[in-house]
Image: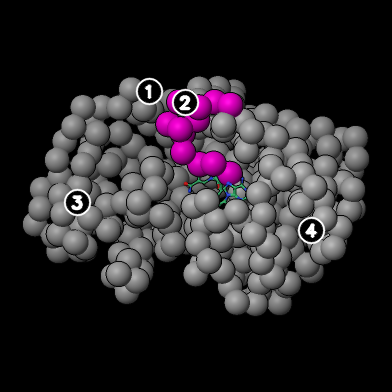
Amino acid sequence: MKVLVTGGAGFIGSNISDALIENGHKAVVIDNLSSGKKENLNKKAKFYKADIIDEAKIKAIFKKEKPDAVIHCAAQIDVRKSVAEPKYDANINILGSINILSACVENKVKKILFASSGGTIYGECGSKAPDEKAFANPLSPYGIAKHSVENYIKFYSEIYGLKYTIFRYANVYGLRQDPKGEAGVIAIFALKMLNNEAVTVFGDGKQMRDYVYVSDVVNANMAALKKADNQILNIGTNKAVALNDIVKIMSRLSKTDKKAVYKPKRAGELFKSFLNAKKAGKLLNWRPKVSVEEGIKKTLDYFKESQ
Ligand SMILES: NC(=O)c1ccc[n+]([C@@H]2O[C@H](COP(=O)([O-])OP(=O)(O)OC[C@H]3O[C@@H](n4cnc5c(N)ncnc54)[C@H](O)[C@@H]3O)[C@@H](O)[C@H]2O)c1
């Protein structure tokens, strides 16, 4: 199968491209390299440096490549940037996605997989992890854009028959996540701790997130190429881990003695976010295989080697 991956030079997209090639598929990557890196690209992937906003270029690439399926990962991923510049975010994350959807329909792509966001779509969580039926309550322009694109995908599916699987990811972490970016606390802490620098925790560190390792996310994408048509699926571990526990595990594994520095809580930050992914278990036979401890170890090893 020929699969086109948008954002395939980034963290999740490059791991997906590697798996596609390992599984005998052809991978075509579109990325503007705004946060993605050329060195993340699999040598066997065909690469186009292009912006998803550039409708003419996107159309031309799709016309030439005629992919069977598309995995749409390209996005501006900085939630705070979306708050500061909602139009900038909507331009890439909504209009850019519409360009991809239109190109899919014009070129008879059979299926699109979309990287949506559970953390920002459901908002604050109570004692039970939300499943896909929970009320969507995105509070940031980034979350609003992800939710809008989900609805555009349903529209394209309903009217033009484009199949889809929408993934609502928890906090994805692992190798190739940008440690200098705004997202990805484990990558940011990994680089700091390996350089024996103190990490900064905003708030009291009791805030909880659902950390899912990137290879588990990749496995869900590989399975959904053939299954779970026209479904929305949470991808998470059903566990909420406190940031202080992440600091503890990472300090122990990286053998740092630097204490974390605590700064005032950031405005608008959620206290608790985690996801019930039973539906993915049922429809994709998917389960997260990598524990937080194991995933952190793999991430630290990766950053140690790549420094
Ligand atoms: N990392 C997470 O925890 C997480 C959680 C939920 C959803 N997601 C979603 O998963 C996807 C991948 O995220 P990631 O963590 O790998 O981030 P990333 O920044 O590493 O990957 C995004 C990629 O898209 C590219 N890109 C950005 N704007 C582009 C544009 N206009 N045209 C073409 N390419 C463009 C970047 O260069 C980068 O390679 C995103 O859609 C993100 O919103 C990520």
Asked if the residue under mark 1 is in contact with the one under mark 2, i.e. CB atoms within 8 Å, the reply is yes
Disc number lying in front (4 or 1): 4
Q: Earlier in the sequence, mark 3 or mark 1?
A: 3
**What is the number of the mark on residue 61?**
4
The residue closer to the viewer here, 36 or 298, is: 36
Residue for badge 2 = 83
Relative image position of residue 123 (x, y in whole percent): 48, 26
- Give the amino acid at mark 2: Val
Q: What is the secondary structure assignment of the residue under circle 3? A: helix
Q: What is the secondary structure assignment of the residue under circle 2? A: helix
Q: What is the secondary structure assignment of the residue under circle 1? A: loop
Q: Residues within 10 Å of mark 3 (few under 14, many from 20)?
A: few
Corner quadrant of residue 257: bottom left
Residue for badge 3 = 248
Q: Earlier in the sequence, mark 3 or mark 2?
A: 2
The residue closer to the viewer here, 9 or 122, is: 9
- What is the C-alpha distance between the residues marked 2 and 1? 10 Å
Relative image position of residue 295 (x, y in whole percent): 37, 61
Q: Which residues are magenta?
A: 75-87
Q: Is residue 143 left or right of residue 246?
A: right
Residue for badge 1 = 268
At 64% from the left and 59% from the top, the residue drawn is 49
Residue 15: tell me if it is visible. Answer: no
- Give the amino acid at mark 4: Ile
